[in-house]
């Protein structure tokens, strides 16, 4: 990246019928690391993600990504710039195998970047290699030939992350990737996030306080659409305002 922030927002605000779900948020999210956003239910975390990915237009304020003002840029153009969001499992083709799902995602990126004037030199073997390396990253090599619909919930969510990884995104937004997972699935997914973090910026919304404290480079606390605090896990753990408003003595 040409700048030292992954994202920057200026006075970012999103209202729903006059109610400010995200209210005047000005923040710089540095490049690299796991940047976690926490806050009570309804704090505006998902709305903030929707604004960053372009799913929702802001009511006012600006968003910068990689040095460019992307406030009004369509979501697919943001994705092309290297900003990816893991959607729910609806992106998965249930009746295809796990391998075929990843392979299609890899191929889509490959087809999208090749052109008449700049034919991609990627060989079919490279596509297979990339597919296998993603399967390895998401820990699904052993079930690659099974249908996606037969995967457990946790495995489907890791497959979903794998489909996003096919784009090799610079910035990855993950909204509650551990929701509904068993302890084993949680463990595998946390390992996956830690494994794919180097060389990227991960923006994570999570509720599991132990995971948050263990893997976050920084934590941003949102409350009623506004930033209450930003800091390292230790700083957030010992921040009195955060303790009062949110953590309530749990950590
Ligand atoms: N499309 C919408 N229309 C109206 N109100 C909305 C809409 N989306 C979100 N809100 C409201 O904005 C506020 C913030 O919601 P948001 O989903 O961003 O919170 P959150 O921090 O992600 O919460 P959770 O932890 O429960 O996922 C809530 O009061 C919610 O009801
Ligand atoms: Mg949410």
Image (spheres, rainbow, N blue to C red):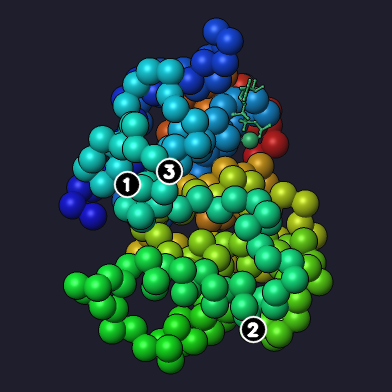
Q: Earlier in the sequence, mark 3 or mark 2?
A: 3
Query: CA–CA distance between discs 3 and 2?
Result: 31 Å
Image height of 54 relative to 95, above or below: above
- In which image quadrant can residue 104 be found? bottom right
Q: Nearer the viewer, mark 3 or mark 1?
A: 3
Say whether residue 61 is left or right of residue 141.
left
Q: Earlier in the sequence, mark 3 or mark 1?
A: 1
Q: Residue drawn at (68%, 54%), measured in percent from left and top?
A: 90
Q: Residue drawn at (34%, 83%), measured in percent from left and top?
A: 122
Image location (x, y in percent) of residue 46: 57, 35
Could you tell me which secondary element the residue under label 3 belongs to?
helix
Residue underneath mark 2:
141
Q: Nearer the viewer, mark 3 or mark 2?
A: 3
Query: CA–CA distance between discs 2 and 1?
Result: 31 Å
Q: Bin the neighbour count of mark 3 within 10 Å (Cα to Cα): few under 14, some 14-19, many 20 and up.
A: many
Marker disc for residue 6: 1
């Amino acid at each position: 990246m040409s700048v030292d922030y992954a994202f920057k927002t200026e006075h970012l605000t999103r209202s729903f019928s006059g109610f400010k779900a995200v209210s005047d948020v000005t923040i710089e999210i540095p490049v690299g690391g796991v940047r976690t956003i926490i806050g009570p239910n309804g704090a505006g975390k998902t709305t903030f993600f929707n604004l960053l990915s372009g799913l929702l237009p802001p009511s006012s304020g600006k968003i910068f990504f990689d040095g460019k003002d992307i406030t009004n840029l369509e979501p697919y153009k943001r994705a092309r710039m290297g900003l990816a969001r893991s959607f729910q499992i609806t992106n998965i083709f249930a009746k295809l195998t796990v391998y075929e799902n990843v392979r299609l995602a890899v191929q889509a990126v490959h087809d999208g970047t090749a052109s008449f004037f700049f034919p991609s030199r990627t060989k079919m073997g490279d596509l297979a290699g990339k597919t296998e390396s993603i399967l390895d990253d998401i820990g699904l090599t052993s079930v690659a030939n099974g249908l996606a619909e037969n995967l457990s919930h946790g495995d489907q969510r890791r497959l979903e992350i794998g489909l996003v990884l096919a784009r090799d995104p610079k910035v990855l937004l993950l909204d509650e990737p551990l929701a509904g997972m068993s302890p084993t699935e949680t463990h595998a997914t946390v390992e996956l996030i830690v494994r794919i973090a180097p060389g990227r910026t991960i923006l994570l919304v999570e509720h599991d306080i132990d995971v948050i404290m263990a893997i976050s480079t920084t934590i941003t606390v949102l409350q009623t659409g506004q930033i209450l605090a930003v800091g390292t896990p230790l700083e957030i753990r010992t921040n009195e305002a955060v303790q009062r408003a949110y953590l309530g003595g749990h950590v």
